[in-house]
Amino acid sequence: MIAKIKSIITGQTARNVYLVTVGNGLTSLLGFVATIIVSRKLGPVNFGLFSLAFGVFMTASKFTDLGLNFALSRYAAQNAVGRWEPYAKYALTLKIIITLVVTVFGIVGSPILAQGVFHNSELTLLFRLSFLALLGIMLLDFYTALSQALGKWLPSIWIQTAASVFKIIGLLALVFLGSTTILSSYAIYLISPLIGAACGALLISRKFLGPVSVDKAHRQKILGFSVWMGVGVLVAAVTSNLDIFIVGNKLPALDVGLYAAASRFSQVATIITASLGTVLSIRAASFTESRHVKPFLKKTLLLGLFIFIGALIVWPLAGPLITLTVGESFVGSVTIFKILLVAVSIGAARSAISANFFSLEKPQYFAFSSIFSAVMLLVVNHYLIPIFGALGAAYTNLINNILLLVFSLVFIKISLAKKSVLL
């Protein structure tokens, strides 16, 4: 047993997780600093409006993907030493077309979204700027996904870090000039992905941008895998910020700001969750035989347990972390943050398990789990937020993650049984 644990924590997959965790940790640390700067300067109310706009931006960015990054990870990983260029070129072409369509519809629909959903016409300009900036974050995500699929973990880290460093420099410049407003701070957030994308263009091979033949077989492979993944991504695009959107719809901007601050701080646990999901999914995507699934599943279960326990260590530090950083005006975020931290920790275990569905060729899982999550968030938030306020959204997040973990365990057991692979 000890030997197995040692092989897990010292193996190549674990080393990749450590590397990506360090990279994600650096990026998240810079994001953490950015949150402190913006929230302190804007205060809970304005930070609530800022967070709603940023939530729309991040949600819209997922609509520019439609599962193509997952398909790219799947097939570029399998052809990393062969002909991966056709997959990259075709995926990028589709993503550019989709991004332009989403941008146009978003700009036109921004007034409706601002006034009709959030009852605040001041958000219209921020929403329109969000849609105009989609091309930058699409390219950032594309280059990150491509570098990871090719096993180039360091370039993927540099890409993300470049965007984060620019963000911090820009925000500090605003503070120095005394020009920190919602609009100026938000502009820095929107421009930073372009810096990361430019870094990606320099670090990753660009020969796929040339005259690479994309035959029908390549197109069918990418589209075939992207269909189910696209459904999952579309639903996940909404659910990823659905809690903040519902809080914004039902509660004042002050509550939005308190919940948003707690949500951003819970990203401490998300660092490891994201690292697990990234490395393990790429690893699982390279498997071509079902016999690899059983040992890989055992490793992911143990890794998920370790991360869950480790993340809970941060729990007692919630109060000081909030009050000593963003200030006493955000003290209402402490309890919310504690609940979200537990929820995200459970999500770490599910993230490790979910990677197995790549090797099992079960992209349906990502669609089903996203739909399940969306329904849960909508229904439970509808009842709990009016009762508990912003705290109700945190309770909903916890319940949702617990049920998703159970759903994942049941789904993978059924999938393995169909492949005649014993747990």
Image (spheres, rainbow, N blue to C red):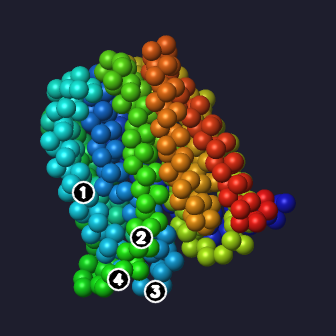
**Position of residue 213 in the picture relative to residue 264 (left or right):** left
- Among numbered discs 1 and 3, the one appearing first in the sequence: 3
- Among numbered discs 1 and 2, the one appearing first in the sequence: 1
Q: Amino acid at mark 2?
A: Ile
Check disc 3 and report its element: helix, strand or loop: loop
Can you say which quadrant of the picture contains the C terminus?
bottom right
- Among numbered discs 4 and 1, the one appearing first in the sequence: 1
Q: Nearer the viewer, residue 79 or 147?
A: 79
Q: CA distance from mark 2 to mark 4?
A: 11 Å
Q: CA distance from mark 3 to mark 4?
A: 16 Å
Q: CA distance from mark 3 to mark 2?
A: 16 Å
**Extreme residue toward the top, this view:** 387
**Extreme residue toward the right, this view:** 1
**Position of residue 100 in the picture relative to residue 257 (left or right):** left
Label 1 neighbourhood size at 10 Å, few (<14), some (14-19), many (20+)? many
Instruction: List the residue tagged with mark 3.
Output: 82
Q: Amino acid at mark 1?
A: Thr
The location of residue 142, given as percent across then percent down, is 34, 64
The location of residue 65, given as percent across then percent down, is 35, 57
Tell me the mark number nearer the camera, choosing from 1 and 2.
Answer: 2
Instruction: List the residue tagged with mark 1.
Output: 99
Q: Nearer the viewer, residue 206 or 381?
A: 381
Instruction: List the residue tagged with mark 2.
Output: 222
Q: Amino acid at mark 3?
A: Gly
Tell me the mark number nearer the camera, choosing from 1 and 3.
Answer: 1
Is residue 199 shown to the viewer in this render? Answer: no
Tell me the mark number nearer the camera, choosing from 3 and 4.
Answer: 4
Check disc 1 and report its element: helix, strand or loop: helix
Instruction: List the residue tagged with mark 4.
Output: 215
Q: CA distance from mark 4 to mark 1?
A: 23 Å
